[in-house]
Image (tube, helix red, strand yellow):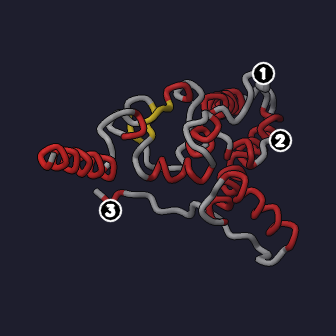
Amino acid sequence: MSHLRNYRKTAKAPRRPFEKERLDQELKVVGEFGLKNKREVWRVNFTLAKIRAAARELLKLDEHDPKRIFEGGAMLRRLHRIGALDESKNKLDYVLGLKIQDLLERRLQTQVFKLGLAKSIHHARVLILQRHIRVGKQVVTVPSFIVRTESQKHIDFALNSPLASGRPGRTKRKRSKAAAEGGGEEAAEE
């Protein structure tokens, strides 16, 4: 059913392509969070801009407006659930103070590194892409997967991963087979 998919832009390239401060700041973020390219930064910026714009629209309304109460509450609950906003910060004003780092902290790649399952942020990305990481019972292969606060404690190695003491990897099986065959031949010669 691919013809029913909604196609829309997921990132917005900056207006000024060669602004030194922005380039340096983006490069720092890419390095800190182990992103593949600048488009990943722009994608999160775009998402953040949409969230902030929605919050600004709601803040324009009267405090007792039903739309502001309903949609504002939903937005805050969603941000609390993904962990981008603290439970104590329960006002729309705090949404305007969100930074790109708040959302990037919630990526699966960052969480795997912070939990100590990977040696570095780049190693975390590789582990995810090579199907070694699961969230709950589901193997996740997307480094940009946003981890909810309740599923954060369920991040672990996949059950069939050699890293989780599952079946040994291809190279280890090959070496152990060669060692077993080699050991058998030596015993026959003696």
Which mark, by number, is residue 73? none
For this view, does 158 lie left or right of residue 180?
right
Quadrant containing the N terminus in the rendered view: bottom left
- Residue 2 image offset from top left, x and y in percent: 32, 60
Q: Do residues under tags 2 and 3 come within 8 Å of each other at their CB atoms?
A: no
Foreground disc of the pair 2, 3 = 2
How far apart are labels 1 and 3 at the CA level? 43 Å
Which mark, by number, is residue 88? 1
Q: Amino acid at mark 3?
A: His
Residue at horizontal 81%, vertical 32%? 62
How packed mark 3 is, by other alpha carbons closer than 10 Å (few <14, some 14-19, many 20 or more), is few
Q: Earlier in the sequence, mark 1 or mark 2?
A: 1
Quadrant containing the C terminus in the rendered view: top left
Q: Nearer the viewer, residue 59 or 13?
A: 13
Q: Which residue is mark 2?
A: 97
Q: Nearer the viewer, residue 162 or 2?
A: 162
Q: Which residue is mark 3?
A: 3
Residue at horizontal 80%, vertical 69%? 23
Q: Amino acid at mark 2?
A: Gly
Q: Could you say whether the residue bearing mark 3 is in a helix, strand or loop?
A: helix
Q: Amino acid at mark 1?
A: Ser
- Residue 152 image offset from top left, x and y in percent: 56, 29
Q: Quadrant of residue 30?
A: bottom right
